[in-house]
Image (cartoon, rainbow, N blue to C red):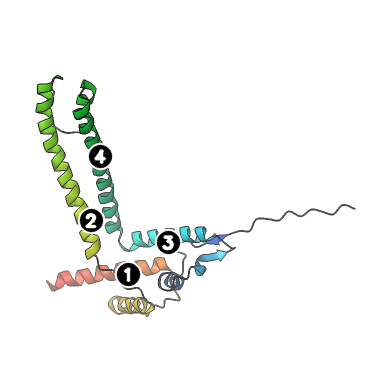
Amino acid sequence: MNRLQVKELPSITKLYLSINKLPLSIFIDCLVDKDYSGLVIEGTPTNEEIEKAWAVIMEEYGNAVSPNEVENKLRDLKTLARKEYQIKRIEMLLDLLEKMPCEKLYNMLYTFGYTLPKLKYNQENVDKVLTQFIAYFKKDITDYQILAKRLETKQEDTPKPKYTRQYFDDVLSSISIALKIPTISVNTITLGAFCAYLNRYNAFIKSQQKQAK
């Protein structure tokens, strides 16, 4: 009698990937103690899978507690990257135009969105157009430097709370007092619920500050 061959089924791996399902207590374990084991719901995921799950949670958490700040920062970073790319392209074009001047390279000066006089290709016109082109280019460099410095300064000036277990207890206590709701325990709510309470609390504080003025 032939023995039945039993295929070994692949193990199922499940992790928390949503702040609306992740218990706040587990989030605190991850953030404060760097203990990410609680992210695993089922199975034995790799370290890479756990790291990806944590990255998803942190991104969702950041968007939930400060959506405008995250959106503005992403927009500024995209603008910065676009300006940096254009600056590098222009530097390359100007270098080529100096070493190997030709009509094709000259016409490329008109592809960067600068308001330039449309003149036929000759050395005199190249000099005229380049004078205006470089003025716009220098302004772009200045704008890029100002934006880069602003982002750097903003990041340095942004106060970063020291995350401890006491920090979360204090925040929840302040929320309960300010919003006049029963005491909230870290063991009974999800991270998503915590973010919602925190946003309500911050809105309440802002309204109180406006009334006090």
> Residue 110 or 27: which is nearer the viewer?
110
Q: Quadrant of residue 87?
A: top left
Q: Is residue 211 left or right of residue 47?
A: left
Mark 1: which amino acid? Leu
Q: CA distance from mark 2 to mark 1?
A: 26 Å
Mark 2: which amino acid? Leu
**Mark 4 vs mark 3: which is more N-terminal?**
3
- 146 vs 206: above or below: above
Write the residue at 30% across / 67% down: 199
Q: Position of residue 122 (x, y in %)?
A: 13, 19
**Mark 2 vs mark 1: which is more N-terminal?**
2
Q: CA distance from mark 2 to mark 3?
A: 24 Å
User: Number of marks in the image?
Assistant: 4
* Label 1: how many Cα within 10 Å (few below 14, some 14–19, many 20+): some
Can residue 52 be spotted in the picture? yes
The secondary structure type at the circle numbered 1 is helix
Identify residue for label 3: 57
Q: CA distance from mark 4 to mark 1?
A: 43 Å
Q: CA distance from mark 4 to mark 3?
A: 36 Å
Give the quarter of the figure containing the C terminus: bottom left
* Label 2: how many Cα within 10 Å (few below 14, some 14–19, many 20+): some
Mark 3: which amino acid? Ile
Q: Position of residue 26 (x, y in %)?
A: 46, 71
